[in-house]
Image (cartoon, rainbow, N blue to C red):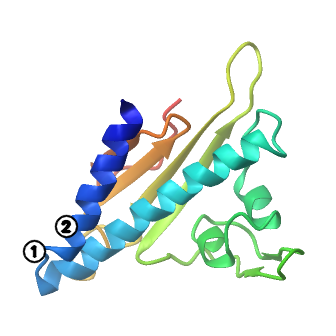
Amino acid sequence: MVKIVTILLAMVMMAGSVFGADNKGSQVTENETKALNALLLFHSVELTYQAREGKGSFADIETMFKLAYIDGELSNATGCPAMVEAIYNNRCAGDGAALHGYKFKVFVQSAEGGKPARFTVFAYPSVASGDGKTGERCFSIDDTGEIRIFAATAQPRASF
């Protein structure tokens, strides 16, 4: 049920970027839609990694980039250090530049002490207020697939 609600929420957000967005808010809406799409990508990547190389664990950002699960621009927006992945020779600049007005924070918890492996990815606007704001909301997704929405000024945090 949670995944159905998540998919419906993402579809509503994407529809908002196509229908009824005024010129002033359209860039913000587009940025938010792209941030949500990135969160869905992170969710897919983490589940793929867990099923393959991770043997039940989730990947940190450097591992996702080194295995070419995500590109250099998205890796960079998470704060990944400068590096080159060996599979396709993609580069991460390592300067932490936002991607489509959003930055991302990845939290990973290893399975230990009877606790399951968990992850949360948090997306937040690089500029949260004023004329140059890049987003009006923060978003997160975790290993359950649930998308959460927060105020633009929320601090990145894990859901576990």
- The secondary element bearing badge 1 is classed as loop
Residue drawn at point x = 33 percent, y = 55 percent: 10
**Residue drawn 28% across and 65% down?**
14
Side of 84 relative to 39 (left or right): right
65, 37: nearer the viewer: 37
Q: Which quarter of the rendering shows the N terminus?
A: top left
Check disc 2 and report the residue beneath it. 16
Picture coordinates of residue 158, whole percent (x, y): 52, 39
Residue 23: give x, y in percent of width and height. 14, 86
Q: Is residue 68 visible?
A: yes
Compared with 152, 58 (above or below) is above
Mark sitting on residue 157? none
Please tell me whether mark 2 sits on a helix, a strand or a loop. Answer: helix
Asked if disc 1 and disc 2 are in contact, CB closer than 8 Å, the reply is yes
> Farthest right residue?
86
Q: Which residue is mark 1?
A: 20
Relative to 22, 108 lies left or right: right
Packing grade of label 2 (10 A; few <14, some 14-19, many >=20) is: some
Q: How would you rate the neighbour count of disc 1 (Cα within 10 Å): few for under 14, some for 14-19, many for 20 or more?
A: few
Q: Residue at x 49, y 55 (%)?
A: 40
Image location of residue 149, percent across then percent down: 31, 47
Image position of 40 (left or right of 25)? right
- Please name the residue shown 15% across and 84% down the image: 24
Instruction: Identify residue type, mark 2.
Output: Gly
x and y percent of residue 79 in the render? 63, 66
Seen as rendered, the residue at the extreme bottom is: 23
